[in-house]
Each structure stands twice: as C-alpha cells, then as structure tokens.
Image (cartoon, rainbow, N blue to C red):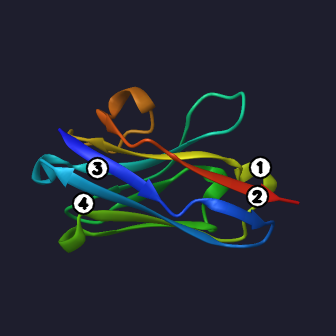
Amino acid sequence: QVQLVESGGGLVQAGGSLRLSCAAAGRTFSVYTMGWFRQPPGKEREFVAAITLSSGLTYYEGSVKGRFTISRDNSKNTVYLQMNSLKPEDTAIYYCAADYTSVIHTAPTQYSDWGQGTQVTVSS
C-alpha cells in the first residue's frame, strides 16, 4: 500500500496553466502505474492520464491530449500533471491513484490506492 498526497490545485482563468503533484510514500517499489483522475461537480470520476513508472509510457483521455502532460520523477516518488490551455470544463477535483498491475487501466476500479484530491477551478 502507498500513501498519496496531491497538491497544486487552485483557481485559474481559462487559458491558464497549473501543475499538479502527487507524492507517494510507502511501498512505492511495487507500484506499476500512476494515474490521474478527476471528478467534476455532480459527475462520475473519470480518467485523465496515466504513466508507467518504469518505462514512462503514457496514455491520455482524448479531451486532454495535447493540453495535459503527465510525468514522473522516480527519485522523488512524485508524479506530475502539467495542465495547459485550461478550460472551464476542466473544473473538478483531481485525484492521483496507484495501480499494481502491469497494464495501463482507465477504469477507477482498477486502481488500489488514492489520494485525497485537490480542487481545480477554471473560470471563464
């Protein structure tokens, strides 16, 4: 099990940028993939992006491709989500999550450990 702590959320105007961080502690050596999810107000939690910690392979949800970049710094046990050209529809609570299986999953149910979330609000 790992403990995950997100940071970096806030209020930004449309077109602006934010960088989210997710710091992991605990059994980090057993984590295969880290994912970012978001939950807009009144909606279900949805996949945003994922990265494999060993090879750095990435995968993005279609609406964020080209605007968001997921990266990792294994020496710091930290995963980042750089978000550019933000839109009001990106407003959500953003969560990071850890997966211990050797496949990139997009379903939240496949991820075992979750952070507490960080709020991102994009004003128009």
Mark 3 and mark 4: Cα distance apart in space = 6 Å
Closer to viewer: mark 2 or mark 3: 2
Mark 1 and mark 4: Cα distance apart in space = 29 Å
Residue at x 29%, y 32% (from the top left corner):
112
The residue under label 4 is 53
Residue 77 vs 60, above or below: the answer is below
The residue under label 2 is 122
Labels 3 and 4: the sequence-earlier one: 3
Residue 55 vs 49, above or below: the answer is below
Labels 1 and 3: the sequence-earlier one: 3
Query: Do callouts 3 and 4 mark residues in contact (Cβ within 8 Å)?
Result: yes
Q: Residue 59, how many percent across, how many down?
A: 45, 55
The secondary element bearing badge 2 is classed as: strand
Q: Residue furthest right?
A: 124
Instruction: Give the crowd class for mark 4: few <14, some 14-19, many >=20 residues within 10 Å.
Output: many
Mark 4 and mark 2: Cα distance apart in space = 29 Å
Closer to viewer: mark 4 or mark 2: 2
Q: Amino acid at mark 3?
A: Thr
Closer to viewer: mark 1 or mark 4: 1
Q: Amino acid at mark 2?
A: Val
The residue under label 1 is 89
Query: Do callouts 1 and 3 mark residues in contact (Cβ within 8 Å)?
Result: no
Residue at x 62%, y 68% (from the top left corner):
66
Residue at x 77%, y 49% (from the top left corner):
89
Closer to viewer: mark 1 or mark 3: 1
